[in-house]
Amino acid sequence: MSDEPFLVVEDLTVRFPTADGLVQAVTDLSYSVEMGKTLGIVGESGSGKSVSSMAVLGLHDARTARIDGSIRVGGKEVVGLSESKMRELRGNAVAMIFQDALAALHPFYKVGKQLTEAYLVHHPSATKREARARAIEMLERVGIPQPDQRIDQFPHQYSGGMRQRAMIAMGLINDPSLLIADEPTTALDVTVQAQILDLLQDLQREFNSAVILITHDLGVVAEMADDVLVMYGGRAVEYGPCTDILTHPEMPYTWGLLSSVPDVTADTSARMIPIPGNPPSLLSPPSGCSFHPRCLYRDKVPGDLCSTTLPALTPAGRGGDHVKRCHLPNPDAIYATEVLPEIAPELVKEMP
Ligand code: SF4
């Protein structure tokens, strides 16, 4: 067995031909996730974070999506895999939990039926009794009270937090090695959000699975992730260990995401600053650095480099595995003197 991480994505490109032209949803994306580790993929809507993760699960329709590059799950190439092979992989080696549990759970079927069917698809020799016992065990593990009774209820009889727990139970019922959680707590209030994130962390430790956490919130990433991938306009713009990126971010878009993290514990001098402007068009992305129309720091780069030349992913100043896509000279110094004093310092202080 090779030593490569459980999930390896290399030069992934996902495009959708449309009547208006080619939508370049993901371009030349590379990352990896080891067993027992969490990768946070962060970016605004349309940054490519969900589209790239759906490619890992083979959820794109081959008739409408053009996928190039390589995705290896447990050493096995999945780009170009048949739908039946992909279905085998989904729910078995890889599972996904979605943002909206109410939409993901079928309203007509009892929670127990949905859980047992998810189990039986991948364990055809198991009996219904065994599948039901497994479903009750999973509901108990995710903290559903009285699971032997709750199993016979419909999704609408669960609270929002309980539905999210039930969906996590469904994602984990076949012991997947890779769990992709797409904005798993966005629809929940803050207290339930914290409980669900704690639960995900506990379950990851128990199952030693690799986790991809897709979010627009760097605060959630700070709590959960070992590594962070920041995406903008379908590309990786900063990638590396979570501690490095949250304490020494080098790309102005990451600074913008950090500035827009609401921190209720921050003192009054700390400000929440939204990123100006809108995400780029994926049909006709801006020339050069696709963030340049919104970037407040491009005048610190000599000439018109930002608007004409796409920056390569290059090692960040402090070395290690941290890389960034930006032409800015001395970004660490600019961050320390101009950005950090403006934003919530608590987030940084909390980091180990
Ligand atoms: Fe801003 Fe230029 Fe860096 Fe892009 S390359 S983030 S426009 S400074």
Image: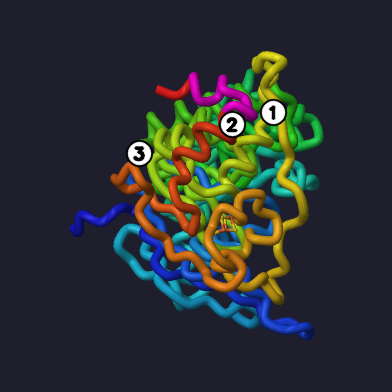
Q: Residue at x 51, y 56 (%)?
A: 237
Q: Residue 235 is drawn in which quadrant? A: bottom right
Which contiguous range is marked in magenta?
Answer: 341-349
Of the numbered discs in the image, which one, if any, rests on residue 262? 1
Q: Dividing the image into 4 quarters, which one contains the N terminus? A: bottom left
Residue 346 falls inside the magenta stretch? yes
Residue 334 in percent (x, y) is at: 51, 40
Q: Which residue is mark 2?
A: 219
Mark whose residue sits in front, 2 or 3? 2
Label 3: state its secondary structure.
Answer: loop
Q: Is mark 3 within 8 Å of ligand 1?
A: no
Q: Nearer the viewer, residue 83 or 330?
A: 330
Amino acid tagged 3:
Gly
Amino acid tagged 1:
Pro
Label 3: how many residues lie within 10 Å, few (<14), some (14-19) or many (20+)?
some
Cβ–Cβ under 8 Å for marks 1 and 2:
yes
Q: Earlier in the sequence, mark 2 or mark 3?
A: 3
> Against 152, is 100 above or below?
below
Residue 56 in percent (x, y) is at: 49, 62
Q: Residue at x 62, y 25 (%)?
A: 344
C-alpha span from label 2 to label 3? 21 Å
Q: Is residue 119 visible?
A: no
Of the numbered discs in the image, which one, if any, rests on residue 36? 3
Q: Earlier in the sequence, mark 1 or mark 2?
A: 2
